[in-house]
Image: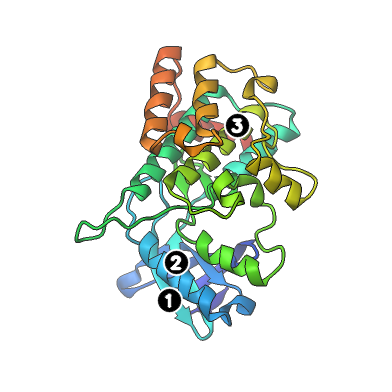
Amino acid sequence: MRIFGRYELIERIDIGGMAEVFKARQRGAAGFERVVAIKRILPAISADAAVIGMFVEEAKLAVQLSHPNIAQIFDLGRVEDSYYIAMEYVDGRSSAALLNRFREKNEKLPIEAVAFLIAEVADALHHAHFAEDELGRPLGVIHRDVSPANLLLSFGGEVKVIDFGLAKAANRISQTQDGVVKGKLAYLSPEQAQGFTIDRRSDLFSLGICAWEMLTGRRAFKRDDDRETVLAIRDGRGERLGKYATVPPALERIVMKALAIDRSRRYRTALEIREDLDRFARTAGLHFGRGELRALMRKTFPE
């Protein structure tokens, strides 16, 4: 147990190229306490004023998002030379961990589970994309890093998207530290891969990749090296969903529309994806919700 400003760091639960994440406890007056997640910027990066500036500005935007499928940011601060954010602690696993468990068993996630998860994430993305400040001005939030690692699933059956707005700082880091964002390249949109200006439809393409992988148990664009991965995305060298999974045509159409290389052919908003998935689930007679996700998570992670 270590003291870090107003928090007690209980254990480190993750580390990446930009930050390390701790399960922590916040204590207050009259016995108040709350378990939170502390994302602390790594010391080597804290010296880069441009990165810290981006991190702070993006965190200020993200803290204004309030949605049940978005992990809430509570605090943004600095302890000595360490910048951090305190955010909602999600007791669960990432969708990447869930996918890996199913891959280990050579099984695929149930179609109804995938439709539910992607719809919940789409709901969060729509809220963020159209969020406004207190004066009614658009915040202009784009996630930039929609990937299985950033989609958390709680043992209580909740779906939580994390790291809204922080990818811009991570992109800056990648210019100065080789390989920092290695592994996330497989979830870029074609316009990101080409260095074009992006809009909310970039997040929708990345969400389509997540859906494709959840349904097939395979990686959509991942190649042997980073350059080939980026080129595969840029050139649209993805494969048809039906080649690797037996899915209803209506669901395949939804996923492949999200994965349109030409963004003008993609969904315009995440809400449209949510609505199509809800319509598909109703028509197909699928029943999957928070209770079913809770049961799936506890069965998959009995430990």
Which of these two is toward me, 250 or 301? Answer: 250
How dense is the environment of label 3, judged by Cα within 10 Å: few (below 14), some, or many (20 and up)? many
Please state which amino acid type lies under the numbered disc 1. Answer: Gly
Picture quarter containing residue 29? Answer: bottom left
Mark number for residue 225? none
Q: Which is nearer the N-term, disc 3 or disc 1?
A: 1
- In the rendered image, which residue does mark 3 sit on? 212
Report x, y in % for residue 99: 64, 37
Instruction: State the residue at coordinates (42%, 31%).
Output: 273
Q: Nearer the viewer, residue 297 or 73?
A: 73
Q: Secondary structure at mark 3?
A: helix
| Residue 262 or residue 11, whichever sits in front | 262
Query: Where in the figure is residue 147, as x and y percent of width and height?
Result: 57, 46
Q: Which is more N-terminal, label 3 or label 2?
A: 2
Return the residue found at the far bottom.
80
Above or below for 242 versus 214:
above
Q: Dot 1: few (<14), some (14–19), or many (≥20) neighbours within 10 Å?
A: few
Q: Does any portion of residue 189 appear in the rendered image?
A: no
- Name the spot of residue 102 as percent of width and height, x first: 68, 32
Whether 286 is drawn above or below 94: the answer is above
Q: Are marks 2 and 1 in contact (CB under 8 Å)?
A: yes
Left or right for 142, reference 9: left
Determine whether the residue tagged by mark 2 lies in a helix, strand or loop: strand
Residue to which mark 1 is pinned: 77
Q: Is residue 5 above or below residue 88?
A: below
Marks 3 and 1 sit apart, C-alpha to C-alpha, by 38 Å
Which amino acid does the dot numbered 2 rest on?
A: Ala
Cα separation, mark 2 vs mark 3, equals 32 Å
Mark 2 lies on residue: 86
Which of pointers 2 and 1 lies earlier in the amino acid sequence?
1
Name the residue located 55 percent from the left edge and 22 percent from the top edge: 252
